[in-house]
């Protein structure tokens, strides 16, 4: 049972490049979330999904897009990376709202 | 922006001391959660609180869901070196028929042996 798996673990992008971060969970969870973590800022919610085919904006959605085509996968896309998007990105999932959210190991992204 | 105010930002304590940290908000939350994050890892749930006034313990950890549903605290008794890490409060905020999980900025705990 892998839990929540994020790929890649590390990535360096040049400004303007695009990329997709993949989150996969094998716990049949309905809810999935993408957060970014910056020093002194805690975890800020980018986008979340309450079920397959649905997505919603979080606190800091600008510059990111997401898709939830399959229940087990939640993709985070950066269409044109900017240095301000340098961060550690965490994906999480939970069975239902109001239950424990399980986190992945994080993806460290640097945009130069 | 952030809707949870977590304090203190950091704490430096001696092994064996008790620790207390709290979160407050101007919004009402349905659930309060406390997570711990070790370096290089994702946050791991410590305690979940589902009802206003609820007091829950997990070993040396005790947390309470405030009766106004706008605050929560976490206490750690008799701290040990492995308690070092960043502690986050999180809350489920009602949002248009669903709920989103939002986090405080974290309390960084350092325990001196």
Image (spheres, coloured by chain):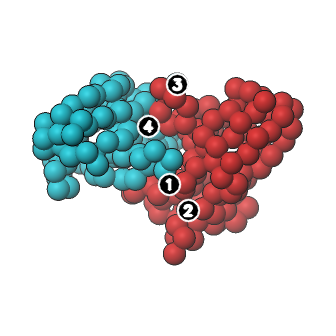
Chain colours: A red, B cyan
- Circle 2 residue: A4
Q: Are marks 1 and 2 in contact (CB under 8 Å)?
A: yes
Q: Farthest residue toward the right? A: A16
User: Tag 2, which chain?
Assistant: A
The Cα atoms of the two marked residues, 4 and 2, are separated by 19 Å
Is residue B30 among what the camera can see? no
- Callout 1: 10 Å neighbours few (<14), some, many (20+)? many
Q: Judge left or right: residue A89 versus residue B51.
A: right
The Cα atoms of the two marked residues, 3 and 2, are separated by 26 Å
Q: Are marks 1 and 4 in contact (CB under 8 Å)?
A: no
- Going from the N terminus, do you reach mark 3 or mark 4 first? 3
Indicate which disc residue B1 carries: 3
Q: Are marks 3 and 1 in contact (CB under 8 Å)?
A: no
Residue under the point 58% across and 49% down: A106
In this rendered view, identify the residue nearer to me: B16 or A88.
B16
In this rendered view, identify the residue nearer to me: A54 or B19.
B19
């Amino acid at each position: 049972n892998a839990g929540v798996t994020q790929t890649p673990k590390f990535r360096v992008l040049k400004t303007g490049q695009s990329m997709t971060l993949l989150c996969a969970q094998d716990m049949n969870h309905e809810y999935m979330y993408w957060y970014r973590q910056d020093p002194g800022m805690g975890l800020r919610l980018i986008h979340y999904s309450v079920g397959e085919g649905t997505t919603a904006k979080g606190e800091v959605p600008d510059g990111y897009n997401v898709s939830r085509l399959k229940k087990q996968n939640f993709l985070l896309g950066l269409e044109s990376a900017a240095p301000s998007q340098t961060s550690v990105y965490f994906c999480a999932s939970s069975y239902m709202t109001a239950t424990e959210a399980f986190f992945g190991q994080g993806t460290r992204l640097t945009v130069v | 922006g952030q809707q949870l105010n977590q304090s203190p930002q950091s704490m430096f304590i001696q092994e064996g001391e008790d620790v207390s940290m709290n979160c407050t908000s101007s919004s009402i939350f349905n659930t309060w959660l406390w997570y711990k994050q070790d370096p290089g890892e994702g946050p791991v749930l410590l305690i979940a609180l589902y009802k206003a006034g609820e007091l829950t313990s997990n070993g040396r950890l005790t947390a309470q869901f405030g009766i106004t549903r706008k605050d929560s605290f976490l206490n750690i008794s008799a701290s040990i070196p492995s308690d070092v890490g960043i502690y986050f409060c999180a809350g489920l905020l009602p949002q248009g028929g669903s709920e989103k999980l939002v986090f405080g900025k974290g309390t960084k705990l350092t325990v001196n042996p």
